[in-house]
Image: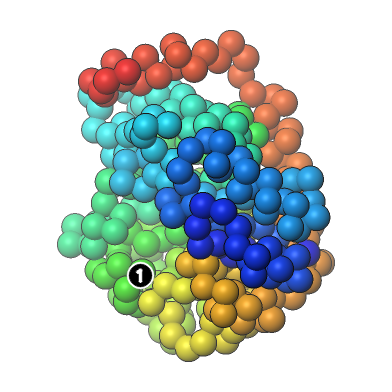
Amino acid sequence: MRAFVCGCQGLTLADDERAFLRESAPFGVILFKRNVETPAQLRALIEAICDSLGRAETAVLVDQEGGRVQRLGPPHWRAYPAAAGFQALDLPLAAKERLVRLSARLMARDLRQVGINVNCVPVLDVPVAGSHDVIGDRAYGRDPQTVARLGRAAALGQLDEGVLPIFKHVPGHGRAAVDSHHALPVVTASLPDLVASDFAPFAANADLPAAMSAHVIYTALDPAAPATLSEQVIETIIRKRIGFGGLLFSDDLSMQALSGGLGARAAAAFSAGIDIALHCNGNLEEARAVAEAAPVLAGASLARAERASTCRAAAAQAAPTGFDPVDAWAEIAAALAISV
């Protein structure tokens, strides 16, 4: 098993994609709207992925946040509210946590029913005035405590149903003035400001099993490289100051925040301390370059992956009982005044 995750192009696997998966043996596959049509189609696609990899089950990732970032949606799946919808409610924080966890559990149940077992949530970024709206309503608030607590509720809801959450974008994308899908953000905040706000939700959730890095330069940390490619940021900030010891994924290496060939990007990410490189767009030529740069998953990275898998299984066994999906959605719909 090699330390990368790749995408695929369509609703079914092409022959060259099957061959690539078989030969390159990625850690898993990530799916997008281009891969989703119906529950039956999606289950068949995931079965084909597992068959090509020769595994009964593999890591199948998705970004299913709710709001504008939702890969599985109507008419076959519910339209879930964005994170900011919960934060805006005139309710005590504990009541908001309950609603977030219920929503996340419903979402995770949708995912497990089709074979998806990893969700790239929660967003733990703290937006500031003047930042790009790429985070915007995906955030659980604009203060670190609210983001930390509601984000944790979302992670726990995923784990309740046996879905591994990947929190993002560590050590913080909330100050970015540009969208890292299209350009490289440079954040000039001081280290004390970053510690007090941006890092705080991640530090409060550092015991969670998996995280995703930010393609952001922080001049106070490493003025030369974005977090994904910076050993200084990964080892000194993410691992030590924030205290995250879990499985660390890169954000998508095909995003325009990064420069150079895909193989060079992947090599730099692994050199910096990333455990799993993520390549999303389904371009096989690019994916081959990432695969060539990806090591076999071993050592500390393998141990982190195994701990994440164990955590996912244990959390599902210990999930709160008495969960009723119909009642849960009715409670959420009533609170947010949305259609059941």
- For image coordinates 68% across by 46% down, the residue present is 47
Type of amino acid under label 1: Ser
Q: Nearer the viewer, residue 170 or 33?
A: 33
Q: Position of residue 196 (x, y in %)?
A: 38, 56
Residue 213 seen in the current view: no
Q: Left or right: where does residue 3 sit relative to residue 106?
A: right
- For image coordinates 64% across by 70% down, the residue present is 16
Q: Left or right: where does residue 125 sit relative to residue 21?
A: left
Q: Position of residue 38 (x, y in %)?
A: 48, 38
> Above or below — where is 174 with respect to 209?
below
For disc 1, the marked residue is 180
- Give the quarter of the image for residue 76: top left
- For image coordinates 61% across by 82% down, the residue present is 289
Q: Position of residue 261 (x, y in %)?
A: 51, 87
Considering every residue shown, the one lying at the far left of the view is 130
> Above or below — where is 320 with respect to 45?
above
| Quadrant the N terminus occupies | bottom right
Q: Position of residue 133 (x, y in %)?
A: 24, 57
Residue 319 seen in the current view: yes
| Quadrant the C terminus occupies | top left
* Label 1 environment density (alpha carbons within 10 Å; few <14, some 14–19, many ≥20): many
Q: Left or right: where does residue 33 sit relative to residue 245?
A: left
Q: Nearer the viewer, residue 317 or 78?
A: 78
